[in-house]
Amino acid sequence: MLIRRNVLSEIMEIKKPKSIIISGTGRYVPEKVLTNLDLMKFVDTSDEWIYERSGIRQRHIAGENETTSDMALNASREALASAGMDASEIDLVIVTTVNPDMMFPSTACILQAKLGIRNNIPCFDLEAACSGFVYGVEVATRMMQSGFYKNALVVSSEKLSSILNWEDRATCVLFGDGAGAVVLSASDQEGVGIIDTVLGADGSDTAMLRMPAGGSMMPASAETVAKKLHSVQMDGKSVFKHAVKTMQEKALEVLERTGVPAEKIALLIPHQANARIIESVAKRIKIPAEKVYVNVERYANTSSASIPIALDEAVRAGKISAGDYVLFVAFGAGMTWGATLVKWGK
Ligand code: UT7
């Protein structure tokens, strides 16, 4: 395969890019807002408990007929517009999600059709839970470094409200819906764009965070529905401990590997699961609060969509300029993790 591709690239004179940059960003969150006070009307909880433990005040909830691909479509259109690009220029689509429109076909294929993107390009879903965006950017970057793809759409979209057990107060108060997207482009600028990524996973304790039913292990049945097994189950305390430890280790690893000191980071964009996790990660890697992007208060945990939503907000608020170092760090079910260092291009 390698030989064939090398020969092919010589024949076709495929030019390898000098860098892969983020050329556009976009986000979409559903209109409906569910505050902690709203939740208190049907869940035995309090605004105080939720805010003190997680930093969350509200979350957005998708409409009944609004799908993961609908939200992905809206975020993608924003990202394409900000890149000044037409959908026809995209030659790779990756959607990251834990709750696709359906088991198959992939949400990426559904999105492709909704965007009217040509059909001779690869479109696929990638599932790495809350680390999905960082995984997606790495996969797209590596594919693009071959020179075979010029512009990729990486879209993270999650309708978590559809897989929550609204009777389980330990989980239902923590999550929300939304989508974030980036356009990645091959560039001739040197030393910018996606600088380095570390990824990892540990599948030894899947019970820590999972949705047990609906797959081959436990196909849907009257019993799985009655037992509410088609919804998120989480051992919050264990996930919290692993998230703090792993996120700080991986952020430091990518900084050490690239030789970029923490004081040079203009903005840390961590996965938005819990304000206390974010605070302790930032403290341990010595990045001051004013350089840490936090929006978990408004959206709760939107899984893989949280980093690209935050990135788009930061870009549109003028918090990122050309030449700035931006650091993403994520942790999620699997367990999976990843950290990416980006030097913002023009
Ligand atoms: O995206 C990656 C995945 N997710 C995360 O990273 C989330 C990680 N975990 C967390 O953020 C935190 O562990 C939580 C916010 C989930 C929980 O915080 P905690 O400080 O670990 O609380 P806890 O689990 O120890 O719960 C303490 C108490 C329990 O009562 P008792 O047994 O001490 O009387 C719970 O029953 O709080 C109770 N509780 C609630 N009370 C009011 C649990 N959920 C609620 C609730 N409202 N919604």
Image: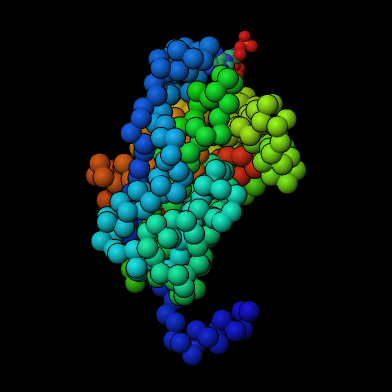
In the image, residue 34 sits, relative to residue 340, either above or below, namely above
Q: Residue furthest bottom?
A: 11
How many marks are shown on the rendered structure? 0
In this rendering, does residue 256 appear at all? Answer: no
Looking at this view, is 128 or 221 the one in front? 221
Q: Position of residue 40 (x, y in %)?
A: 46, 13
Q: Position of residue 278 (x, y in %)?
A: 47, 32
Q: Position of residue 142 (x, y in %)?
A: 51, 65
Corner quadrant of residue 290 = top left
Q: Residue at x 49, y 32 (%)?
A: 161
In the image, residue 336 sits, relative to residue 197, either above or below, namely above
Looking at this view, is 288 or 158 the one in front? 158
Q: Position of residue 35 (x, y in %)?
A: 39, 21
Q: How is the image coloured?
A: rainbow
In the image, residue 41 sits, relative to residue 314, either above or below, namely above
Quarter of the picture for ligand 1? Answer: top right
In this rendering, does residue 247 appear at all? Answer: yes
Q: Residue at x 40, y 47 (%)?
A: 70
Looking at this view, is 345 or 177 the one in front? 177
Q: Residue at x 46, y 73 (%)?
A: 120
**Which quadrant: the C terminus?**
bottom left
Q: Residue furthest front?
A: 222
**Which quadrant: the N terminus?**
bottom right
In the image, residue 40 sits, relative to residue 305, either above or below, namely above
Q: Residue at x 60, y 32 (%)?
A: 232
Q: Please indicate whether residue 2 sits to the left or right of residue 156 in the image.
A: right
Looking at this view, is 311 or 268 the one in front? 311
Q: Please indicate whether residue 111 sits to the left or right of residue 84 in the image.
A: right
